[in-house]
Image (tube, rainbow, N blue to C red):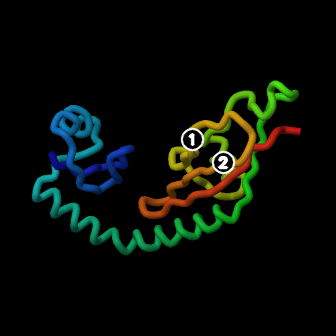
């Protein structure tokens, strides 16, 4: 079944992509939830016209996202967290560091990035050290960066 996505769907595609899915997934989940519409010939023509008109606007948005990506790469991000003391606790954190903490760190530096577009490699962080994260600023602009989790003084 061919569908046109009306919004981004994790592990499937981005808004206005034409995707092929199994009939049940499309009929029972994507279409009723409003995530997709059937990819009929008329819908494909409307989509092509919409994409053509949006191409010019998209160019400036991509340039802005690339500038933000360069600014994020230049940042030296250190996130402070409470850590255990002593030989047994070592570098273990009380709680964990998540993509929300990283989004707050970006906000403190003057860059507003939504937490749902940040993915920390390996999931939530439970120890001190350096870690990698992937930030999606646009469907075609992803930036990988390194940050450090340090203990509170």
**Label 2 crowding class (10 Å Cα cut-off): few <14, some 14-19, many 20+?**
some
Side of 72 where 8 appears, left or right: left
Residue at screen point 58% across, 64% down: 69
Q: Quadrant of the N terminus?
A: top left
For the point 28% across and 36% down, the residue is: 33
- The image quadrant of residue 28 is top left
Q: Secondary structure at mark 2?
A: strand
Residue 132 rendering spot, x and y as whole percentages: 62, 50
Question: Left or right: 70 with respect to 4?
Answer: right
Q: Is residue 52 above or below residue 144?
A: below
Whichever of labels 2 and 1 marks the residue nearer the N terminus, that label is: 1
Q: Report the side of 21 relative to 35 (left or right).
A: left
On residue 91, which mark appears? none
How crowded pointer 1 is (Cα within 10 Å; few <14, some 14-19, many 20+) is rated as: few
Q: Is 82 on the left-hand or right-hand side of 86?
A: left
Residue plotted at (80% across, 27% down):
89
Farthest left residue in view? 41
Residue 150: horizontal and vertical position, in percent? Answer: 79, 43
Which quadrant holds residue 70?
Answer: bottom right
Residue at figure coordinates x 25%, y 45% from the top left: 36
Note whether 62 is above or below 7 in the view shown: below
Contact between labelled residues 1 and 2, with CB atoms less than 8 Å apart: yes
Query: How far apart are labels 2 and 1 at the CA level?
Result: 9 Å
Numbered tag placed on residue 131 in the rendering: 2
Residue 48 position, x and y percent, is 22, 66
* Residue 34 pos. (x, y %): 28, 40
Q: Quadrant of the C terminus?
A: top right
The secondary structure type at the circle numbered 1 is: loop
Q: Which mark is residue 122?
A: 1
């Amino acid at each position: 079944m061919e569908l046109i996505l009306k919004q981004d769907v994790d592990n499937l595609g981005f808004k206005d992509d034409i995707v092929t899915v199994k009939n049940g997934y499309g009929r029972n989940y994507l279409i009723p939830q409003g995530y997709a519409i059937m990819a009929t010939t008329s819908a494909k023509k409307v989509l092509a016209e919409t994409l053509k008109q949006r191409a010019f606007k998209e160019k400036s948005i991509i340039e802005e996202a690339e500038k933000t990506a360069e600014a994020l790469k230049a940042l030296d991000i250190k996130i402070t967290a409470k850590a255990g003391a002593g030989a047994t606790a070592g570098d273990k954190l009380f709680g964990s560091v998540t993509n929300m903490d990283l989004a707050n760190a970006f906000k403190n530096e003057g860059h507003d990035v939504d937490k749902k577009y940040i993915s920390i490699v390996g999931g939530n962080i439970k120890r001190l050290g350096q870690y990698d994260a992937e930030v999606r600023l646009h469907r075609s602009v992803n930036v990988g960066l390194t940050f450090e989790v340090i203990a509170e003084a």
